[in-house]
C-alpha cells in the first residue's frame, strides 16, 4: 500500500486485468509473488536499512524474510512504475530527469518481459532498495475451499516523491490515487470492485488522517501482525465469512469447497460486497 497526502491520505490502487484468473477487474494494491531471485546474498547487497535476519524476525520465519521486501519493491516497479530506491549521495530517483525517466520506462518494460532482472537493474544503476521505509502491515491467507489459495502479506510505504505512477497495461489496466473512504464508498455504490482483504486493509488505514501517522503506527506494530485465515461458511442465506475471534470461528467447519455454491470467485465477490456495507472497524 503506497500512501501519500494530497492533502488527505490517499492510497494507490491498480485494477487487475479483466482476464485474470482470480477476481479480474478488481481494484487491488500493487503486488505479486515472491520470486527465488528476490532473496539471497545478491538481494541483500541491494538493500539498505534492513537485514535478512531483521526481516525474518518481523515475519516470524527462520530465514529469507528480506525476499518479501525485495518482492514488494520489484512488483511496485513492475505494476505501478514506482521505485523506492536511491543512489547513495545522488539526487532523488526519477524526480524530473527526462532522460533518466525515459531510460527507466524501457528498463521497466524489459523487467516485465523477463529479459532484464530487477536486481541487475539495481546493480547497473547503483541503486539501493529502501526496504527500511517499507513496513509490514497485515497477513491474510485465502479460505480453505478455494481452487487457488494465496498466502499474502501486506506492506505499507510512503510513495516516492516526484515519481508518477502508471499501470503496466498487462497485469494491471488502470491506476488511481484515492482516499480509503472514497474507495470504500465507490465499492458500496458498485462503481468499483474490491475484495474482502483489500476492504479490511482500506478500513484499517482509513483511521489515520495522514500518511505520517499511518507509517509511524505501522512501524511500531510490524512485529505483532496476526495471521488472518477467514472461513467461508454456507448457511441458509448463501455464504458468509467468519474471521478469527468471531463467534463460532473455532466451531465452524473447515470447508472443502463443496459447501460453497457456484463459482468461488462469485462467492468472494458476494462476500466482499456484504463486508463493506457497514464499514466495520478492523
Image (cartoon, helix red, strand yellow):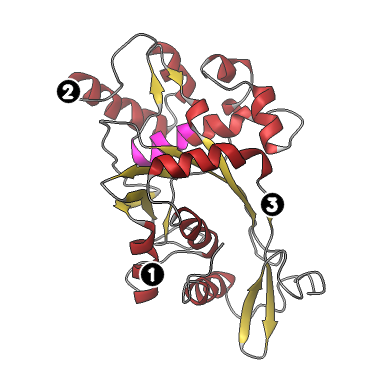
On screen, 150 above or below 189?
Answer: above
As drawn, 110 above or below 87: below
The part of the image, by quadrant, that contains residue 167 is top left
Callouts 3 and 1 close, C-beta under 8 Å:
no
Residue 266 x %, y %: 52, 74
Is residue 149 on the magenta stretch? Answer: no
Q: Which residue is mark 1?
A: 187
Judging depth in this view, the residue of 215 and 136 nearest the camera is 215
Callout 2 secondary element: helix
Q: Residue at x 48, y 60 (%)?
A: 203
Q: Is residue 175 visible?
A: no
Compared to residue 107, the image places residue 89 above or below, namely above
Badge 3: how crowded within 10 Å, few (<14), some, or many (20+)?
Answer: some
Measured in 3D between alpha carbons, the distance from the residue under mark 3 to the one under mark 1, in whole angstroms, is: 25 Å
- Label 1's element? helix
Is the residue marked by circle 2 packed among few (<14), some (14-19), or many (20+) residues within 10 Å? few
Q: Earlier in the sequence, mark 3 or mark 1?
A: 1
Q: Secondary structure at mark 3?
A: strand
Observer-side mark, 2 or 3, equals: 3
Q: Which mark is residue 227?
A: 3
Which stretch did the figure color magenta?
A: 73-81
Amino acid at each position: 500500500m503506497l500512501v501519500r497526502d494530497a492533502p488527505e491520505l490517499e492510497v494507490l490502487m491498480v485494477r487487475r486485468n479483466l482476464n485474470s484468473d482470480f477476481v479480474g477487474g478488481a481494484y487491488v494494491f500493487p503486488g505479486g509473488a515472491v520470486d527465488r531471485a528476490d532473496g539471497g546474498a545478491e538481494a541483500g547487497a541491494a538493500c539498505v536499512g534492513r537485514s535478512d535476519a531483521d526481516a525474518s524476525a518481523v515475519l516470524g520465519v527462520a530465514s529469507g524474510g528480506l525476499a518479501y521486501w525485495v518482492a514488494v519493491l520489484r512488483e511496485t516497479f513492475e505494476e505501478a512504475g514506482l521505485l523506492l530506491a536511491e543512489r547513495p549521495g545522488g539526487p532523488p530517483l526519477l524526480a524530473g530527469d527526462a532522460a533518466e525517466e525515459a531510460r527507466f520506462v524501457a528498463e521497466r518494460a524489459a523487467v516485465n518481459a523477463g529479459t532484464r532482472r530487477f536486481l541487475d537493474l539495481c546493480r547497473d544503476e547503483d541503486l539501493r532498495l529502501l526496504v527500511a521505509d517499507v513496513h509490514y502491515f497485515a497477513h491474510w491467507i485465502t479460505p480453505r475451499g478455494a481452487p487457488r489459495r494465496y498466502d499474502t502479506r501486506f506492506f505499507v510505504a510512503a510513495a516516492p516523491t516526484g515519481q508518477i505512477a502508471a499501470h503496466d497495461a498487462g497485469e494491471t489496466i488502470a491506476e488511481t490515487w484515492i482516499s480509503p473512504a472514497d474507495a470504500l464508498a465507490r465499492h458500496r455504490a458498485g462503481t468499483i470492485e474490491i475484495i474482502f482483504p483489500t476492504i479490511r486493509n482500506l478500513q484499517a488505514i482509513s483511521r489515520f488522517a495522514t500518511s505520517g501517522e499511518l507509517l509511524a503506527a505501522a512501524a511500531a506494530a510490524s512485529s505483532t501482525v496476526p495471521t488472518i485465515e477467514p472461513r467461508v461458511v454456507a448457511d441458509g442465506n448463501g455464504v458468509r465469512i467468519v474471521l478469527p475471534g468471531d463467534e463460532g470461528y473455532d466451531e465452524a467447519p473447515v470447508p472443502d469447497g463443496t459447501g460453497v455454491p457456484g463459482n468461488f470467485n462469485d462467492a468472494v465477490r458476494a462476500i466482499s460486497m456484504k463486508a463493506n456495507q457497514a464499514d466495520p472497524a478492523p
